[in-house]
């Protein structure tokens, strides 16, 4: 699906991370976007925004990532961030049963939308303190028809993989029939410009 000049087609997708406080949402994004990990990651206030691309050969997926705050007081803001998202990564901590229950509530909340849902059981490096069995989460994900992986922002395990798999699964629509902000819209070559040629509005 190469562009006119052989440049890859770039598809933009809004992606949101949801889940309890301290499960590692920000660390997953930082690992994915920068390849780094911080033991003392600050709690997110409101939400944070980042972009990162995934190359699928002749197609490039550019994720516009909203990393939401898990603290209870920010919960009411979440719909603002997941509305219109093409994909959601719902994160829990494998050492916290409570965070898995919270993740299941997010899955139910988003199920009625057409957002592609991925469940991430993070902190897989802390296997000794595990409270949620991998098989339990996998069976739940299979039941709900959603993607599931155990990840570790610390070791890097499955971090690139989960975003790559989401990129593969998202439907790539052409610019003409894409709903802007939703199912991804393509831009040839350089990312950025999505306004139709000829422009509109304003001017004198
Ligand atoms: P909020 O922004 O409050 O919603 O939290 P969050 O989900 O963004 O969690 P954050 O990324 O800030 O991580 C919380 C803590 O967990 C940090 O101290 C991280 O160092 C630690 N952490 C995150 N991911 C991992 C992981 O994969 N393994 C281990 N061992 N620790 C992790
Ligand atoms: Mg955070």
Image (cartoon, grey):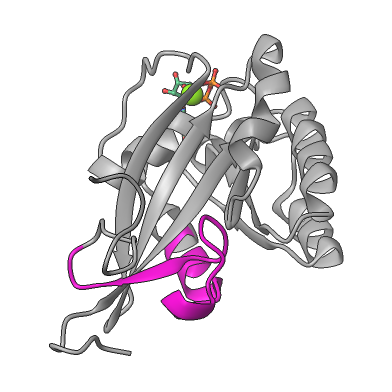
* Quadrant of res 94: top right
**25 shown above or below 185:** above
Nearer to the camera, 45 or 131: 45
| Residue 187 lies in the magenta-colored region | yes
Q: Residue furthest front?
A: 204
> Residue 35, can we see it?
no
Going by the image, does 195 lie left or right of 120?
left
Residue name at image x 63 percent, y 41 percent = 82
Nearer to the camera, 148 or 126: 148
Percent position of residue 146, x then y: 72, 63
**121 shown above or below 49:** below
Percent position of residue 150, x then y: 58, 51
**95 shown above or below 113:** above
Going by the image, does 187 lie left or right of 47?
left
Q: Tally the marks.
A: 0
Percent position of residue 71, x then y: 64, 14
> Residue 92, can we see it?
yes
Nearer to the camera, 125 or 194: 194
Percent position of residue 135, x then y: 76, 57
Going by the image, does 105 lie left or right of 45?
right
Range covered by the magenta-colored residues = 163-190
Residue name at image x 58 percent, y 28 percent = 23
Going by the image, does 141 lie left or right of 74?
right
Residue name at image x 43 percent, y 39 percent = 28
* Quadrant of res 33: top left
Q: Quadrant of the N terminus?
A: bottom left
Residue name at image x 77 percent, y 39 percent = 106
| Residue 87 lies in the magenta-colored region | no
């Amino acid at each position: 699906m190469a562009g006119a000049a052989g440049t890859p087609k770039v598809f933009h997708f809004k992606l949101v991370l949801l889940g309890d406080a301290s499960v590692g949402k920000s660390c997953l994004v930082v690992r994915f976007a920068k390849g780094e990990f911080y033991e003392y990651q600050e709690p997110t206030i409101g939400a944070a925004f980042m972009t990162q691309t995934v190359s699928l050969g002749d197609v490039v997926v550019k994720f516009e990532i909203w990393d939401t705050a898990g603290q209870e007081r920010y919960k009411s803001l979440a719909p603002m961030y997941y509305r219109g998202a093409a994909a959601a990564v719902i994160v829990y901590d494998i050492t916290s049963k409570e965070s898995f229950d919270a993740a299941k509530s997010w899955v139910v909340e988003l199920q009625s939308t057409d957002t592609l849902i991925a469940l991430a059981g993070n902190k897989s490096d802390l296997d000794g303190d595990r409270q949620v069995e991998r098989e339990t989460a996998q069976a739940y994900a299979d039941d709900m028809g959603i993607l599931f992986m155990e990840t570790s922002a610390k070791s890097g395990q499955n971090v690139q993989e989960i975003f790559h798999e989401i990129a593969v699964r998202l439907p790539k629509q052409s610019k003409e029939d894409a709903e802007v902000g939703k199912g991804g819209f393509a831009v040839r070559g350089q990312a950025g410009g999505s306004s139709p040629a000829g422009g509109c509005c304003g001017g004198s």
